[in-house]
Image (cartoon, rainbow, N blue to C red):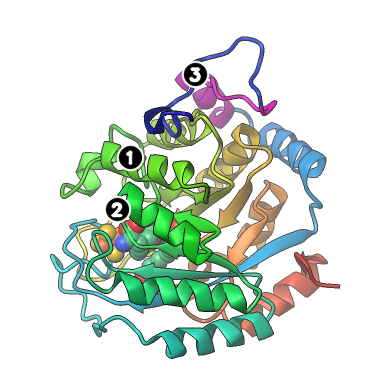
Amino acid sequence: MQSASVVSRPAAPTAAGSADGLRHDWTQEQVEALFALPFNDLLFRAATLHRQNFDPNRVQISRLLSIKTGKCPEDCKYCPQSAHYDTGLAKEDLLEVETVLEAARAAKDSGASRFCMGAAWRGPGKDFDQVLRMVEGVKALGLETCASLGLLNSEQAHQLKDAGLDYYNHNIDTSPEHYAEVITTRSFDDRLTTLDHVREAGMKVCCGGIVGMGEKQDDRARMLQSLANMARHPESVPINLLIKIPGTPLEGVEDTDSFDFIRTIAVARILMPASYVRLSAGRQAMSDEMQALCFFAGANSMFCGERLLTAGNPSPHADRSLFGRLGLKPEGAA
Ligand code: SAM
Ligand code: DTB
Ligand code: SF4
């Protein structure tokens, strides 16, 4: 068996490619050079790769639910749920299994193919069995299952896999260099260790980050390089635009240039051509035209529903209208 420590650490550079036919040997300079391309050249390259790997008019739809809200001991400077900041959030204990299953049924009826459960935890604690029963129940409804529960040890990863968890979401969030500016209660390396456990237990990885936290373009390049040089690319790569939450240390950070966000999507598509790239949090602050350019640049997954975990998301009506105007269809729909 492959040792856990080589699963999500950068693969050794290979001149002649790799077993999966994808590159895992991007240098920082190469990724920065992609960011520096003229916008039209970058989007053309990304869109070309997108079409070679996916139907460009299909978008995978996930639905999120916060199964445990607020009072998180971690100090992530972007997060409304950290106990370190006063964001005025209504806190909730772990939801009952039946409440979660009701939400999952509604998500399925509204066209979602994956149901993602997020918990404001450093990692699972005493209520973990209840979460395992949620995973079993959601899986039994015929939905793909995803969970985002913070740091895991190897045993917890295996228990989730055995309960029927398909994907584990665990973001690296930013570059290794910028990480300590954003989070001090855990390290970039702690995240990689959890990702190793997730891979080793046989689950798919959902791993991405946030744009707009005061990082430089080079940090975005280093974040995407870190994802692409993992021994296996994450199957799902969420790219979040920071939602500026009043009360968090990042509430007043400077706006991100829309084109730089779209460039980040395009570079993610080029580095990880066979992965789903998710246009994740932050769509409420985007124009329809900006979202359309993100889809053109290679985004092919998104969250639908009025709410993400605690923050807002465009209404289902607005998303249906956007899909209609762009001729997009949810993946799996007729
Ligand atoms: N506590 C778990 C963890 O940190 O992995 C799971 C939930 S946490 C809210 C999941 C992800 O949501 C974070 O890694 C971050 O990328 C994203 N996120 C949280 N707050 C955000 C915000 N204000 N804007 C954009 N993305 C955000
Ligand atoms: C991810 O990358 N984005 C989602 C999901 N993974 C768990 C969460 C976005 C959260 C946005 C802030 C909120 O709703 O509280
Ligand atoms: Fe907690 Fe996750 Fe929010 Fe960090 S991002 S404060 S770990 S809920």
Mark 1, ligand 1, within 8 Å: the answer is no
Which residue is located at x 52 percent, y 47 percent? 202
Q: Which residue is label 2 attached to?
A: 151
Q: Identify the secondary structure beneath mark 2.
A: loop
Question: How far, Cα to Cα, is label 2 from label 1?
Answer: 8 Å
In the displayed structure, 237 sits above or below 314; it is above
Residue closest to the far top:
15
Dot 2 or dot 3, earlier in sequence? 3
To which residue does mark 1 refer?
193
Magenta range: 20-36
Position of residue 308 in the picture relative to residue 111 (left or right): left
Q: Residues within 10 Å of mark 2 (few under 14, many from 20)?
A: many
Residue sitting at x 13%, y 65%? 84
As for residue 152 lying within the magenta part, the answer is: no
Q: Position of residue 43 (x, y in %)?
A: 69, 39
Position above or below: 22 against 161:
above
- Asked if one can make out residue 65 in the rendered structure from this viewpoint, the answer is no
Circle nearer the viewer, 2 or 3? 2
